[in-house]
């Protein structure tokens, strides 16, 4: 049990949990946008196309509602709502396509970062080899080379802002 708790603590401290939380928040916000688009724009258009009866919906009524003399529903209608199924499929496909594009862009950024790290490491190795091969002279110590400042990308800045907001909201809730 103690080992499990230590592993869980290591997992939480890796930072992947925060990345996952940010991804979940962005994903749920995006899903809300896609759902609103599909339900409020695409579904009415889909249901309008066939013009099925008075409802204008892609529905199949299997059993009509049973109503007593006073107007109360005794047995609800049994309806197959094809339009809702089509809307759910469209919502899924739109969400999947956009999330695929986001993940693809993230992976490209990650690859570029790894290539840059490899290039720097290779450059450092070459510099070390050249220093080892150079004759030893007694001279004043060389000044360190200026460090190039790498500007974070817009995506990184956005993720940092989201992370700061999450930390701020977590500290406010605590």
Image: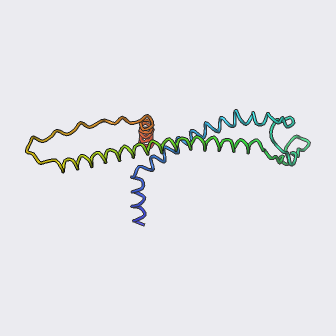
Closer to the camera in the image, 86 or 64: 86
Q: Which of the 4 quarters of the picture holds residue 65?
A: top right
Q: Is residue 141 left or right of residue 37?
A: left
Please say if 17 is above or below 31.
below
Q: Which of the 4 quarters of the picture holds residue 172?
A: top left
Residue 7 appears anywhere in the view: yes
Q: Is residue 92 left or right of residue 142?
A: right
Colouring used for the render: rainbow
Q: Is residue 19 left or right of residue 69?
A: left
Q: Which residue is found at the position 41% from the left and 60% from the top?
A: 7
Closer to the camera in the image, 49 or 30: 49
Residue at the left extreme?
138
Residue at the bottom extreme?
1
Residue 74 place in picture, x, y as percent: 86, 47
Closer to the camera in the image, 150 or 9: 150
Q: Which of the 4 quarters of the picture holds residue 36?
A: top right
């Amino acid at each position: 049990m103690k080992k499990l708790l230590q592993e869980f603590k290591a997992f939480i401290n890796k930072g992947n949990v925060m990345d996952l939380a940010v991804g979940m928040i962005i994903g749920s916000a995006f899903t809300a946008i896609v759902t609103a688009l599909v339900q409020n724009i695409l579904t009415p258009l889909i249901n309008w196309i066939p013009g099925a009866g008075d409802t204008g919906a892609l529905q199949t009524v299997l059993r009509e509602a049973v109503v007593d003399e006073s107007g109360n529903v005794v047995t609800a209608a049994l309806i197959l709502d094809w339009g809702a199924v089509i809307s759910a499929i469209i919502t899924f496909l739109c969400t999947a396509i956009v999330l695929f594009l986001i993940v693809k862009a993230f992976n490209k950024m990650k690859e570029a970062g790894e290539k840059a790290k490899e290039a720097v490491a290779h450059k450092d190795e070459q510099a070390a080899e050249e220093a080892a091969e150079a004759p030893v002279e007694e001279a004043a110590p060389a000044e360190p080379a200026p460090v190039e400042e790498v500007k974070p990308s817009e995506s990184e800045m956005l993720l940092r802002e989201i992370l700061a907001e999450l930390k701020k909201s977590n500290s406010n809730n605590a």
